[in-house]
Image (cartoon, rainbow, N blue to C red):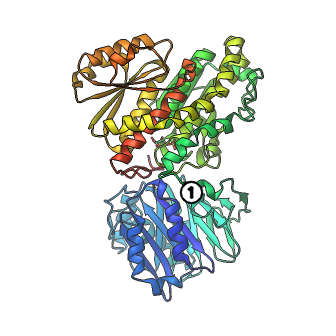
């Protein structure tokens, strides 16, 4: 999604802003722009496509831009209007004195535009953002004070926004504000940064202040003043940031996605440490703020999430129902928010989100919270908007995930669900204690098993090479691995653009089987356990239609050699833990196919890392 950066200080702003934007590239974008205070005016430079195009534009203006030490920058993910230079940010008022960059959606932009046009403003772009430039300029004409103008303008704006604004008449000042979109200020030595996310400035400083909704920050190189929407001063709450800049380097891997797949064993060790020391001790989840009594009284759980997090939630449902005998509903956040949902104070609502900023999930969470349910958030970003809504916050600590395709955060979400299910089962006494002890010791072995898969990844690479020419791909599975099939298919389609679909294997014969012929690869997630024989039969049905059969299995059964053209073997594991093992080869297949096809693995087209619009 869009990303904002701002800089005020004594250094040359242009490289700081460009570098900051590059660090935000993972959010996804299709155009970019920068505004710099150069000599007598604020100059705007924009380009469509990757940031290298903006760099090229700027290379023709080095003399005028190099001296600037205040500026704002933006990467845009198009929502209103195509990705063109005109629609790229920064946007300006008619005289060009005021510039603005924006992340989010101005919901009442049409009404605002009509009013502003009636006042003589001329619109050049199709964006919702341009209304902000004209609106703040109108308020500035009345107040001659940029901070006050922003405070007045935002009172008339509906929707979500993070804004950074400069005015040529107050050339040393940057004014920023937000509502339902992330914005953070980095504090350096006589310099400040503003950004949608901390990677934009973490190499310069790890001191920061997170802006709350409706607060307005006025920043010069010597001061940072934060006020609420009515102009009352807000004390600065300075935080030390947890992320290391080294987390943003590829560490020798060709892509962030490959690096993040390889980090998964350590991610699991990291979450387990402090929560599950030995199989003999109960799981410790001090983060769950429900009392033991209210936990025992829960009559229902709802889990809301989107995309990959939704697939983790589906596995969460499976395991919680099995261990705790509490009914669990899982729903895509975007569906949850537009119907009457039934919750009460005995319902636990769990929101799952890597970024903690996904607009649909955030809205759904707020809706559930207003009905009195306890809100538990599972997120990789304890500093996110969702985390701030949480009654209980389970931080998955996967470290920053740069690649748009979620991998290590998914594994971390799954482990969090396993911990939660065991924790609740131990309190409720709803699962045999010996079974849980064995389960916990199996959990502790998971990192080694993933390392085994990664050590033999050439087999998976060969599989990817063999099938990289296909236009379609079907994944089948049953039971707790059905979401694995969905997630494997999602990974492949989002980074290779191949039409991949996951099906519950038993559903194949109810329609999808019509698509099968000798051109169609069908990958069966065939893990030993409850539904093994069933998936085998479903695979036979597909083979009988000449499909190109691939097995992902922990079975050593010889007869698989007759049924499948390609077999990927994974280590043996308890069936309920098998989604942790089975997803890793599917992530790698998606990665290698996309890589063979020469796709932009870390930044697939049309996608954003943090989807902050509904
Ligand atoms: C897929 C992917 C997306 C996200 C989805 C939700 O690889 O990354 O499907 O999972 O946009 O994002 P979060 O988890 O940040 O709420």
Task: Read off the residue under disc 1.
Answer: 249
Residue at figure coordinates x 52%, y 67% from the top left: 19
Question: Left of 549 or right of it: where is 461?
Answer: right
Classify residue 250 by image quadrant: bottom right
Q: In the rendered view, would you say 55 is above or below 445?
A: below
Residue 474 position in % (x across, y down): 33, 29
For this rendering, which residue is in front, 457 or 417?
A: 457
Residue 568 position in % (x across, y down): 43, 27
Q: In the rendered view, would you say 12 is above or below 466?
A: below
Question: Left of 60 or right of it: where is 454?
Answer: right
For this rendering, which residue is in front, 531 or 208?
A: 531
Residue at figure coordinates x 61%, y 18% from the top left: 299
Question: Left of 247 or right of it: where is 24?
Answer: left
For the N terminus, which image quadrant?
bottom left
Would residue 158 be seen by someone viewing this image from the given angle?
no
Question: Left of 309 or right of it: where is 107?
Answer: left
Residue 286 position in % (x across, y down): 75, 33
Query: What crowding class fits label 1: few (fewer than 14 Cα within 10 Å), some (14-19), or many (20 or more)?
Result: few
Residue 77 position in % (x across, y down): 40, 57
Classify residue 88 by image quadrant: bottom left
Residue at figure coordinates x 33%, y 67% from the top left: 125
């Amino acid at each position: 999604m869009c990303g904002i950066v701002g800089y005020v200080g004594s250094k040359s702003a242009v490289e700081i802003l460009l570098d900051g934007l590059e660090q935000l590239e993972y959010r996804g974008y299709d155009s970019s722009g920068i505004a710099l205070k150069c000599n007598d005016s604020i100059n705007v430079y924009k380009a469509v496509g990757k940031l290298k195009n903006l760099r090229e534009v700027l290379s023709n203006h080095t003399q005028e831009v190099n001296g600037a030490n205040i500026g704002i920058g933006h990467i845009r993910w198009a929502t209103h209007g195509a990705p063109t230079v005109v629609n790229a940010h920064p946007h300006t008022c008619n005289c060009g004195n005021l510039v603005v960059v924006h992340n989010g959606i101005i919901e009442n932009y049409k009404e605002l535009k009509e009013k502003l046009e009636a006042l003589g403003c001329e619109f050049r772009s199709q964006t919702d953002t341009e209304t902000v430039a004209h609106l703040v300029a109108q308020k500035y004409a009345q107040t001659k004070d940029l901070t006050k103008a922003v405070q007045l303008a935002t009172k008339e704006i509906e929707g979500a926004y993070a804004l950074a604004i400069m005015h040529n008449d107050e050339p040393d000042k940057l004014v920023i504000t937000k509502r339902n979109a992330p914005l953070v200020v980095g504090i350096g030595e006589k310099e400040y940064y503003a950004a949608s996310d901390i990677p934009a400035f973490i190499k310069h400083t790890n001191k920061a202040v997170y802006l709350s909704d409706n607060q307005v920050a006025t920043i010069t190189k010597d001061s940072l003043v934060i006020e609420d929407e009515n102009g009352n001063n807000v004390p600065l709450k300075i935080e030390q940031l947890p992320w290391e800049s080294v987390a943003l380097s590829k560490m020798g891997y060709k892509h962030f996605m490959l690096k993040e797949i390889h980090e998964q064993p350590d991610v699991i060790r990291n979450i387990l440490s402090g929560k599950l020391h030995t199989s003999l001790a109960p799981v410790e989840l001090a983060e769950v703020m429900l009392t033991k009594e209210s936990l025992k009284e829960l009559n229902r759980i709802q889990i809301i999430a989107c995309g990959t997090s939704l697939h983790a939630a589906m596995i969460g449902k499976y395991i919680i129902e099995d261990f705790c005998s509490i009914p669990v509903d899982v729903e895509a956040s975007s569906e949850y928010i537009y119907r009457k949902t039934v919750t009460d104070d005995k319902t636990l609502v769990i929101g799952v989100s890597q970024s903690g900023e996904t607009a649909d999930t955030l809205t759904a969470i707020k809706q559930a919270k207003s009905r009195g349910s306890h809100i538990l958030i599972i997120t990789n970003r304890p500093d996110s908007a969702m985390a701030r809504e949480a009654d209980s916050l389970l931080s998955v600590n996967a470290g920053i995930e740069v690649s748009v395709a979620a991998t290590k955060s998914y594994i971390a979400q799954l482990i969090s669900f396993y911990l939660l299910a065991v924790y609740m089962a131990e309190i409720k006494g709803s699962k045999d204690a010996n079974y849980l002890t064995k389960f916990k010791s199996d959990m502790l072995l998971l990192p080694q098993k993933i390392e085994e898969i990664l050590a033999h990844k050439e087999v998976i690479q060969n599989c990817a090479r063999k099938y990289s020419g296909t236009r379609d791909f079907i994944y089948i599975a049953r039971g707790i691995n059905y979401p694995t099939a969905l997630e494997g298919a999602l990974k492949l389609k989002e980074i290779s653009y191949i039409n991949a679909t996951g099906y519950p294997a038993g559903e194949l014969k109810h329609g999808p089987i019509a698509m099968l012929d000798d051109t169609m690869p069908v990958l069966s997630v065939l893990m030993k356990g409850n539904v093994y024989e069933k998936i085998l039969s479903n695979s036979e049905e597909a083979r009988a239609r000449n499909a190109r059969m691939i097995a992902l299995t922990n079975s050593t059964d010889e007869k698989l050699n007759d049924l499948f053209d390609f077999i990927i073997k994974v280590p043996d594991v308890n069936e309920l833990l098998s989604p942790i093992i089975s997803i890793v080869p599917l992530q790698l297949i998606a990665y290698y196919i996309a890589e063979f096809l020469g796709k932009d693995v870390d930044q697939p087209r049309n996608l954003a890392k943090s989807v902050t619009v509904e």
